[in-house]
Image: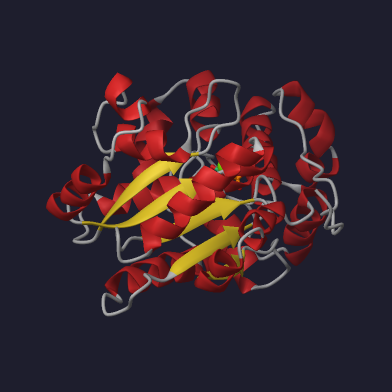
Amino acid sequence: MNFDHVHQAAHKLFDLNDQDRMLACSSDFWVKHPRAERLIDSIYFAMKMTGRINAPCMLCTAEGGQGKTALILELKKRNIFADNKMLFVTMHQNANSHNLRDLILIEMGVSVGRRARAGDNLTPELQARIKSQKIRGIVIDEVHDALTLTTVQQKQNLSLLKNLSSDIYGLSVFAFGIPDAARVLRRDPQLERRYAVKALAGWDNGPDFRNFVATYINRFPLKKPTNLKDQTLYLKILETSLGLTDNIVKILQSAAMAAILDKSECISHYHLDNIEEIMENFNFSLRLNEPANEAEGD
Ligand SMILES: Nc1ncnc2c1ncn2[C@@H]1O[C@H](COP(=O)(O)OP(=O)(O)O)[C@@H](O)[C@H]1O
Ligand SMILES: [Mg+2]
């Protein structure tokens, strides 16, 4: 059989039985796309600007499921080979969550024991580690979770955020969160001025979207080629997904699994017209994000 329509990296999957081949379709992988690449480029560019009193910072906002965490994982992977190192933390939302300072200390390998909690001055130690580990930036995921903290905790986090990018630490801060996260910064005029806000918008029907979908489909171990010239196929995927990456990926993965199960071996209109039922069979569901709340109050 000829599998030229499938990416070389997936050819070995044709040795698997059908069930394992289906499972292979359900595993996530990163697809390069221009918008993410531009963002990654601007992050590396920001870390190169060393001649400034305050390091340039960025807040990247996008709806849940648009691909923020996936992009951060990709950044992390690539950062292993980069000269300018980054630190990666996530503001988790839970009762015994650490504050930002503790998250950073843990990530740097400083134990957060009694000493640290007693309010000792850890600045010199942090400064030394940032220097010796060649750290130029810090990436914070789920930064909107800061909004759920108490006022005192928020104040501590905001002041640390400011110090991180000041001459005390000199780090570029790259914060990621849902659009509401911009409210965190607005609490402090200095912070607000220091951050460039970039919104990662939903997909629209253009070449970037079609490339993303086609690249994804080419990676599935399906025995027959899907008709990637069929514009209405793309349109159906875009409309059902509401332009959300998470939905696009789940639609494609479940359609590919269905195509193995029903032996058609390529994604067709039949799958897209019945996508909700197909997704349900694989315990996937479409994500319908709440419209952004524009109200400003707390
Ligand atoms: N560039 C990409 N290539 C392939 N899959 C992606 C890409 N970006 C996002 N995804 C997928 O979309 C889904 C949601 O992404 P995620 O990063 O969790 O969104 P967010 O953090 O914005 O809520 C995940 O399954 C992820 O693997
Ligand atoms: Mg996320």
The structure residue drawn at horizontal position 24% and vertical position 45%, both measured from the top left corner, is 126
> Residue 29, how many percent across, how many down?
46, 43
The N terminus lies in which quarter of the figure? top left
Residue 17 visible here: yes
Measured from the top left, where is residue 202 in percent x and y? 70, 61
Q: How many marks?
A: 0
Is 39 rendered above or below residue 261? Answer: below
Q: Position of 137 compared to 205: left or right?
A: left
Q: Position of residue 119 (x, y in %)?
A: 36, 32
Measured as percent of width and height from the top left, residue 97 is found at 52, 26
Q: Residue at x 62, y 58 (%)?
A: 61
Quarter of the image holding residue 211? bottom right
Residue found at x 70% / y 24%: 282
Horizontal arrangement in the rendering, residue 56 relative to residue 202 (left or right):
left
Q: Considering depth in this image, is 96 or 218 the residue closer to the camera?
A: 96
Residue drawn at 19 percent across, 43 percent down: 125
Residue 240 located left or right of residue 249: right
Q: Nearer the viewer, residue 265 or 8?
A: 8
Left or right of 233? Residue 120 is left
Quarter assignment of residue 198: bottom right
- Looking at the rendering, the quadrant in which ligand 2 lies is top right
Q: Is residue 3 visible?
A: no
The colour mode here is secondary structure
224 or 269, which lies in front? 269
- Spot the residue most to the bottom: 51
